[in-house]
Image (tube, rainbow, N blue to C red):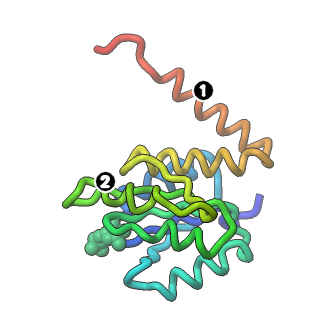
């Protein structure tokens, strides 16, 4: 299997890594090659343009974009690539990520962003969803994903203590 990244995980700031690392961890667990980059819609707009414009041509299949506050990164990335973009609202200090969620989820018709939950659960599910998208055309990955889910189910206790 090639090690070329299939999923690009981008985030608006290094401060988002504590959340976005959960998406990377899931992809590690499922054996999905990925890359992680800091790309800010506001502080590094040219970097965002270059990343999104080149993403498909570099062989990426899915982009996961996490940002907080005025979280324009996922939507702007989606505006510049036809690849599926999954948006993770990072929990902000002032408004607990509700601002991030609203910034990401209310895209105009025609430019979709698949928006996940605020914070860690959203990052985990973005990783799982990216893997599920890739698994539709990769039977070995589909098997790994099904095994991951079965292990999760088996790990759920029946008693609360
Ligand atoms: C957003 O602003 C980032 O995605 C981050 O969630 C938030 C705060 O960034 P820092 O000030 O911590 O760099 O662009």
> At x 44% / y 74%, what residue is drawn?
38
Q: Quadrant of residue 159?
A: top left
Q: Nearer the viewer, residue 63 or 97?
A: 97
Left or right relative to 136: residue 99: left
At x 62%, y 76%, the residue is 80
Above-or-below relation of 95 to 80: above
In this view, the residue in front, 32 or 114, is: 114
Q: Vertical placement of 35 versus 145: above or below?
A: below
Are dots 2 and 1 in contact, CB under 8 Å?
A: no
Instruction: Please state the horizontal and vertical placement of residue 30, each as a whole percent of the image.
Output: 61, 46
Q: Is mark 2 within 8 Å of ligand 1?
A: no
In the image, what residue occupies the spot 53% across and 50% down?
A: 126
Q: Secondary structure at mark 2?
A: helix
Q: Which mark is residue 98?
A: 2
Q: Is mark 1 within 8 Å of ligand 1?
A: no
Disc 2 or 1, which lies upstream in sequence? 2
Q: Residues within 10 Å of mark 1 (few under 14, many from 20)?
A: few
Residue positioned 44% across, 60% down in the render? 104
Mark 2 crowd level (few <14, some 14–19, many ≥20, 10 Å Cα): some
């Amino acid at each position: 299997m090639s090690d070329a990244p299939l999923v690009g995980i981008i985030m608006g700031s290094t401060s988002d890594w504590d959340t976005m690392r959960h998406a990377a961890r899931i992809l590690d667990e499922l054996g999905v090659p990925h890359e992680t980059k800091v790309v800010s819609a506001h502080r590094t707009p040219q970097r965002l343009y270059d990343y999104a414009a080149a993403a498909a041509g570099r062989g990426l299949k899915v982009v996961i974009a996490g940002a907080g506050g005025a979280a324009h990164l996922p939507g702007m990335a989606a505006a510049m690539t036809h690849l599926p973009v999954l948006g993770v609202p990072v929990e902000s200090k002032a408004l607990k990520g509700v601002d991030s969620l609203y910034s990401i989820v209310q895209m105009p018709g025609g430019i979709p962003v698949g928006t996940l939950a605020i914070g860690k659960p959203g990052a985990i599910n973005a990783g799982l969803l990216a893997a599920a998208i890739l698994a539709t055309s990769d039977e070995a990955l589909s098997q790994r994903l099904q095994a991951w889910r079965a292990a999760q189910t088996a790990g759920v206790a029946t008693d609360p203590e």
